[in-house]
Image (cartoon, rainbow, N blue to C red):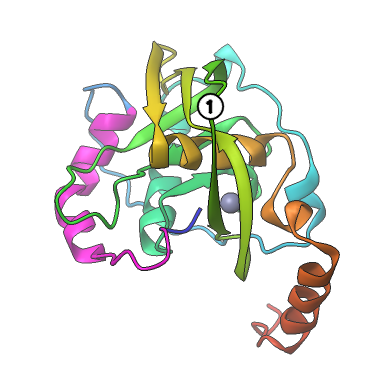
């Protein structure tokens, strides 16, 4: 998900605060990787694309560990570089239930909190709803008004399988719900009106494409 319109984004500040070690430390719950694998910026898939419409599968217990932690770090790096406040695995072609999010990215006075969620699930949601204009890294240049729960409680495991649980409110809640939608194959492209969608498709046809490799 993209930062809210009008919010500035200081990538260098994020990079400073979240160096390679910090990201790996966060991913591994305190265990630093000795290898210091360089992180990679992954390609973000743009809608419409069949991968974005697929339902993700749960991460299996035998997949927990360093490889998963590395994937979470790569996704975080990709999200910050975009710049974005959230990224779900299908957006980088990985059809597993994995999400990274930093809803405070771009906020001057907020401390950065990087969430790296494996198999996240909403376990409680408020009756109170909120409506916001959202933007998605996989659906460039369009804004769609979406109604979401004002607060949600999300349970997930980290890269090592440790259970986590947290209450998200307002903007953070919106970001997390947006990312969880990706895991069931739902994007802003699906939520856009027919008119917005056809305008988007026309604009995509004109957009420059990278040369095939
Ligand atoms: Zn998105």
Let me know if residue 9 is in the magenta part: yes
> Could you tell me which quadrant the C terminus lies in?
bottom right
Report the side of 55 relative to 12 (left or right): right
Picture residue at 43% right of the left edge, 22% below the top: 65
Q: Position of residue 122 (x, y in %)?
A: 56, 20
Res 21 → quadrant: top left
Front in this rendered view, residue 14 or 109: 109
Q: Read off the magenta span.
A: 4-27
* Residue 33 seen: no
Picture residue at 29% right of the left edge, 46% below the top: 104
Picture residue at 51% right of the left edge, 25% below the top: 118
Report the side of 172 relative to 127 (left or right): left
Picture residue at 56% right of the left edge, 12% below the top: 61
Rendered position, 204 above or below 82: below
Secondary structure category for the residue under label 1: loop
Q: Position of residue 71 (x, y in %)?
A: 47, 40
Q: How many marks?
A: 1
Report the side of 27 relative to 118 (left or right): left
* Residue 204 seen: yes
Rendered position, 203 above or below 129: below
Front in this rendered view, residue 63 or 104: 104
């Amino acid at each position: 998900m993209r930062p809210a319109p009008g919010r500035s984004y200081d990538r260098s500040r994020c990079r400073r605060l979240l160096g390679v070690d910090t990201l790996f430390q966060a991913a591994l719950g305190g265990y630093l990787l000795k290898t210091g694998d360089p992180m990679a910026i992954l390609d973000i898939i743009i809608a419409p694309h069949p991968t974005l419409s697929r339902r993700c599968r749960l991460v299996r217990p035998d997949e927990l560990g360093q490889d998963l932690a590395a994937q979470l770090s790569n996704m975080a790096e990709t999200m910050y570089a975009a710049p974005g406040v959230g990224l779900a695995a299908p957006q980088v072609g990985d059809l597993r239930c994995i999400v990274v999010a930093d809803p405070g990215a771009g906020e001057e006075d907020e401390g950065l909190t990087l969430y790296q969620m494996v198999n996240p699930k909403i376990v409680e949601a408020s009756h109170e709803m909120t409506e916001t204009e959202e933007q998605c890294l996989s659906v460039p240049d369009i804004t769609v008004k979406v109604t979401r729960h004002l607060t949600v409680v999300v349970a997930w495991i980290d890269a090592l399988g440790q259970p986590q649980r947290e209450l998200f409110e307002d903007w953070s809640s919106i970001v997390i719900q947006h990312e969880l939608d990706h895991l069931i194959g739902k994007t802003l492209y699906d939520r856009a009106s027919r008119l917005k969608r056809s305008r988007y498709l026309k604009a995509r046809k004109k957009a420059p494409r990278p040369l095939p490799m």
